[in-house]
Amino acid sequence: MNSVTDQLRTYARSLGAVPGVYRMLGAEDALLYVGKAKNLKKRVESYFTRALDTRLAAMVDQIRRIEVMLTRTEAEALLLEAQLIKNLKPRYNLDLRDDKSYPYIHITGDAAFPWLRFHRGSKAAPGQYFGPFPSAAAVRDCLDSLFRTFRLRSCEDSVFKNRSRPCLQYQIKRCSAPCVGLISEPDYAASLRHAEWFLSGRSNQVVDEMIARMDRAASQLEYEQAADWRDRVSQLKRVQAKHYVSDAREDLDVIGFAQQGGTACVQILVFRNGLNLGNRSHFLRLPLDADLPEVRSQFLMQYYAEHECPSEVLLRDKPESPAALQQALSELVRRKVKLSYQPRSERLKWLELAERTAEQQLISRLQQAASLAQRFTALNALLGTGKSVRRIECFDISHTMGEATVASCVVFDEEGARKMDYRRFNISGITPGDDYAAMHAALRRRFKRLQQGEGTAPDLLLIDGGAGQLKQAFEVLDELGLPNILAVGVAKGEARRAGHETLIVGRNLREVFPGPESLASHLIQQVRDEAHRFAITGHRQQRGKARLRSPLEDIAGIGPKRRSQLLKAFGGIRGVAKAGIDELIQVAGVNRELAERICARMREA
């Protein structure tokens, strides 16, 4: 033991047997680890008196000092620990990568005929929100069932207000066409109420009301309408069989754990109002001798600090300090939360399902990681530069005839795609269709930040293009004083066949042909295809916004109020385009000069 370790052991012995949070600090006060303890003295001292695995021993060797913060209860210590881990992201703590919020179904509340939509993000818009759902696919599956059963509108207001006849959704019986008045406002409100009941777990009440309306239509000899209600009841019962689960009337999360080596998978089955909303996986990096009860506690506190906590959480085994954890979760969400263990009957089947899914997902993850590691090894051997490539950044450009040019930057490391580091750049101020200028602009914006100390430098910069695009990268890197970053161009092969690309390596433009069977080629294809997907998705979004933009917005002297007056006066943008100067000046606030500018802009559009 060195003198620093002796001092730390002495400090640990001086701590009281009280609850609190401790922070392990290394050189230059770099935060290594945050932990909580019911007994600070016993927990902190254990780091210096017991045998540790390689990872933890490496951490202890780096500790230079320890800070503690006392709390009144163990539950307070759990809350404080979760907050510090979330904000400070210590190097050796449980690594929970979850950079996306959960999606909801939103029923808008600001229209006579509200519409149902997929929603992710802030719940600031008026209306009702149902969820959270564990995945986007689960939301879309539920929305599909709702549209088929209740025939509510799915179109945005910009489409809804400009319809003159029913769309295809009406023809296939997924919408009741409120846009053209084929359903009255009270009848639409009744269908909307049924959808809200369904999402609130009152589907039996919906079925009873539908059957009553079916019987009423039959008694009035309206057999076609009665048959329609019969079909909708059958559809709703099929949905019930698919989504509803007995003995899950309250909100419930079922959590299954699987661990292998230093990686764990947590599988969460989500039930809300008796409705099975699906599942979601989370992967954790752990110390080799991780204490599983402690891991469960840390995961639950970190996870529910970011996501909605149900009234009950179901686990296989007790986490560390279950009473304190239950109290901490209750204080976190300001209502009672129940932790349940060792379930029986139907609940045991859910838990076993979650655990089997977690095991399968973990096996797949580890196999993918091993394959990815082999691909990185093959790439390093292929490039032969003597530098180890562990982080790759790839740039691609997407546009349509020069319109809405978007550049993408995707990042891969030895664990796969790092989506939190992805970036898009909307390119303007260049000659439309000039890919060289677009690449130069995107690279400069990315590496200007790196020059200023923001972000991490790549070991390999991939450019989707040939020698011309690659030279743009060298110009930017030289300009910003970053000449040591290895840049490689990916030139498309014969007939653009995947796997037949030529790599243009380094400043001497050395050409390398890995071939379709090369593991290095597989990695290059994977990264390049992801960059292309990310770029074209951004381009389509920008192009879509441009298509929806009114030409009136580009005319000086026309604000939102005057634009609205013009559209109302002529019945929409087509009417404005057909109007002459004499007709336009009849609108309040439009003089002859402005009318001439409007006509000129409409001819351009």
Image (tube, grey):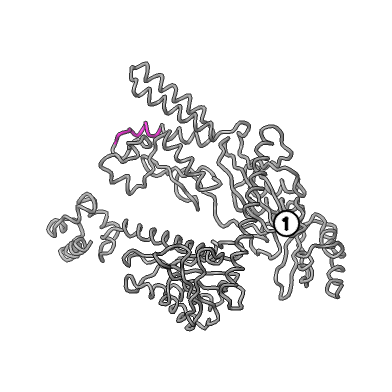
Image: magenta residue range: 181-189
Task: Say which quadrant the C terminus sits in.
Answer: bottom left
Relative to the observer, which residue lies in front, 446 or 534?
A: 534
Residue 417, above or below 154: below
Relative to the observer, which residue lies in front, 216 or 586?
A: 216
Q: Is residue 52 left or right of residue 295?
A: right
Residue position for label 1? 261
Relative to the observer, which residue lies in front, 561 or 148?
A: 148
Neighbour tally class for label 1: few under 14, some 14-19, many 20 plus, Cα within 10 Å? few
Task: Say which quadrant the N terminus sits in.
Answer: bottom right
* Callout 1: SS: loop
Residue 140, above or below 205: below
Q: Is residue 436 left or right of residue 336?
A: left
Query: Looking at the picture, how far across and down is residue 81, in whole percent?
Result: 71, 58
The answer to if 449 sits in the magenta stretch is no
Residue at 48%, 24% in the rendered image: 208
The answer to if 186 sits in the magenta stretch is yes
Q: How many numbered marks have been drawn onto this rendered protein structure?
A: 1
Residue at 76%, 71% in the rendered image: 62
Using the rendered view, name the quadrant where residue 40 is placed: bottom right
Q: Is residue 43 left or right of residue 531?
A: right
Query: Looking at the picture, how far across and down is residue 410, in whole percent?
Result: 50, 65
Query: Looking at the picture, how far across and down is residue 452, in whole percent?
Result: 54, 78
Q: Amino acid at mark 1?
A: Gly
Q: Is residue 33 left or right of residue 232?
A: right
Query: Looking at the picture, how far across and down is residue 20, in whole percent?
Result: 77, 58
